[in-house]
Image (cartoon, rainbow, N blue to C red):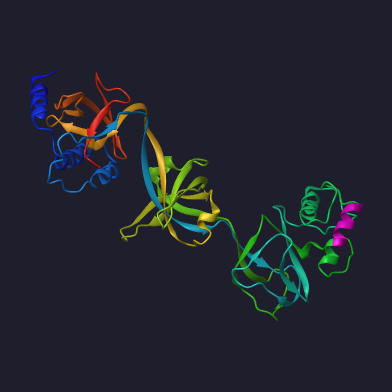
Amino acid sequence: MSADIKESTETAHRRPPSRRRRAVIAVSVVAILATGAVVAAAVFLREGPADAPPPAGAVSTEPVTSGDMVAETKVVGAIAYARSEAIASGVAGVVTELPSAGTVIDPGGVLYRVNTLPVLLLSGTTPAWRDFSSDMSDGPDVLQFEQNLAALGFLEEEPDATFDWDTTVAVRAWQVSLGLEPTGSVERAMLLFWNGSLRVDAPAARLGQDVGPGSELYTATSVEKVVDLAVSSSDRSLAVAGSGVTITLPDGSTVDGAIQDVGSPQSRPKADGSGSSVVIPVRITVADQDAVADLALASVTVSFASTLRSDVLTVPVDALVPLDDTHFAVEIPPSGDSADRELVPVSVGAVASGRAEISGDRIVAGLLVVVPAR
């Protein structure tokens, strides 16, 4: 050990640093050692003023931990519905029924009525591109249609890609339940395939209005909610499709999320009007939909984690004690009947999220070091 470090160590044995001094020390360490350490500073600056010294023998400790050093980047986003689409009439006539805003329509439900005839919602991703009848050829759209008939309880056979006699019987039973003539066939204009349930958002037509094919009736959204946000181009590496994130809701609770889509770079005006910046649109799925069921267009905070260093030893930043302007140590609590505390010099590496990477001859995982009382 060099003479200057030894002298500093001996001084520290005589007078351990106060909690107030450690807070100042920790801020200095962050400023010297790492960029992006504002998060770390925010963690330990919560320590309040400590005018009175702690009781004799009272020591707070934290273990040296081994693992990856993870940096956290927080970005503000907004809750949004995953899908929004205009619902247009498939037939010509007079609108005789429209759902009210906020209504949730499940597969098998009525989307609207024109000339009193219902247009029905079914679940699926393939649009209806032809009429459904016994003379149609096999195809995946038939399978999708039969899967709906089975889900609604009208088809007992295993769904397949063939519109056969069992399908005809199932369609007739379905039509009877709807008060329709049991023809056994369905015009494609009377069906809308949508992936799951939909929510009525804003009306665009009114009852009694004459409409033609393609006339917009209302805007619909999915019931699933997502988080939309934009990360700066410098943080592009954080946005990796499939990666997990943590979402902090307005009430302070958190839910898990996953990056679903990463868009192409876009130029957007800066908030202060000083020009534009390049951002990356990101969409995030929310694992617990119940947690966001009552939130619409609400602001949330999304935390992205990135690994700075792998398999390193770390301590809380405020565990570091300066020996001089460039050297640091950690304090070892007294053992046995001894009241003396010991400073062990360490080398300091990366600093992030309130923790500092350290190494030294005596530094091992599990070693307890002194930290300001929490």
When asked about the image quadrant of residue 181, the answer is bottom right
Q: Position of residue 198 (x, y in %)?
A: 64, 61
Locate residue 190 relative to residue 254 in the image: left or right: right
Question: Where is 184 relative to 211, above or below?
Answer: above
When asked about the image quadrant of residue 116, the answer is bottom right
Farthest residue, direction bottom = 208
Q: Position of residue 7 (x, y in %)?
A: 7, 24
Question: Where is 289 relative to 16, above or below?
Answer: below
Q: Nearer the viewer, residue 83 or 47?
A: 47
- Residue at figure coordinates x 81%, y 67% from the top left: 178
Q: Position of residue 41 (x, y in %)?
A: 25, 44
Q: Is residue 185 visible?
A: no
Residue 261 in the magenta stretch? The answer is no
Q: Nearer the viewer, residue 316 or 41?
A: 316
Q: Quadrant of the N terminus?
A: top left
Residue 170 in the magenta stretch? The answer is yes
Magenta-tinted stretch? 165-173
Q: Position of residue 367 (x, y in %)?
A: 28, 25
Q: Quadrant of the C terminus?
A: top left
Q: Is residue 321 visible?
A: yes
Question: Where is 232 relative to 318, above or below?
Answer: below
Locate residue 44 relative to residue 305 in the image: left or right: left
Locate residue 23 relative to residue 180 in the image: left or right: left
Main SS of the magenta part reads: helix
The number of numbered discs placed on residues in the rendered structure image is 0
Farthest residue, direction front = 337
- Residue at figure coordinates x 37%, y 44% from the top left: 73
